[in-house]
């Protein structure tokens, strides 16, 4: 994980994703555990869960870009 090596986040970082098979798979979940990251996923079949996170990060990126 290149981003992890560059940023060196504190233990307990929350990784939010949708329920895609690549994120829900045991290999990926094990990797998150290796880096002491906590997994956060949207509820099954509820696309609106990610909408709040996307709006927040869009606002954050817009403010930082100024």
Image: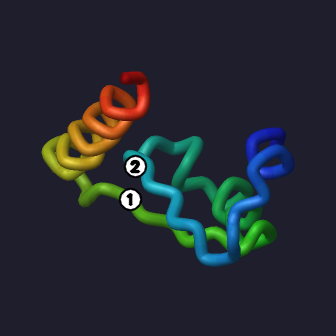
Q: Residue at x 75, y 50 (%)?
A: 7
Q: Is residue 51 left or right of residue 3?
A: left
The reply to whether residue 45 is in sight is no
Residue found farthest to the top: 66
Please give the residue where the numbered disc 1 appears in the rendered image. 41
Q: Nearer the viewer, residue 55 or 26?
A: 55
Q: Is residue 15 left or right of residue 53?
A: right
Q: Residue at x 52, y 58 (%)?
A: 15
Describe the element under mark 1 as helix, strand or loop.
strand
Q: Nearer the viewer, residue 26 or 10?
A: 10
Q: Is residue 46 left or right of residue 20?
A: left
Query: Which quadrant: the C terminus?
Result: top left
Q: Residue at x 32, y 27 (%)?
A: 62
- The image quadrant that residue 40 belongs to is bottom left
Circle nearer the N terminus (2, 1): 2
Question: Is the C-beta separation of discs 2 and 1 under 8 Å?
Answer: yes
| Position of residue 46 measured from the top left corner of the image (x, y, whole percent) | 16, 49
| Position of residue 25 measured from the top left corner of the image (x, y, whole percent) | 60, 54
Please give the residue where the numbered disc 2 appears in the rendered image. 19
């Amino acid at each position: 994980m290149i981003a992890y090596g560059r940023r060196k986040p504190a233990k307990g970082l929350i990784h939010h994703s949708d329920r895609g098979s690549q994120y829900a798979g045991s290999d990926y979940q094990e990797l998150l555990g290796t880096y002491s990251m906590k997994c956060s996923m949207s509820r099954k079949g509820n696309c609106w869960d990610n909408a709040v996170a996307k709006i927040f990060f869009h606002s954050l990126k817009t403010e930082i870009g100024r």
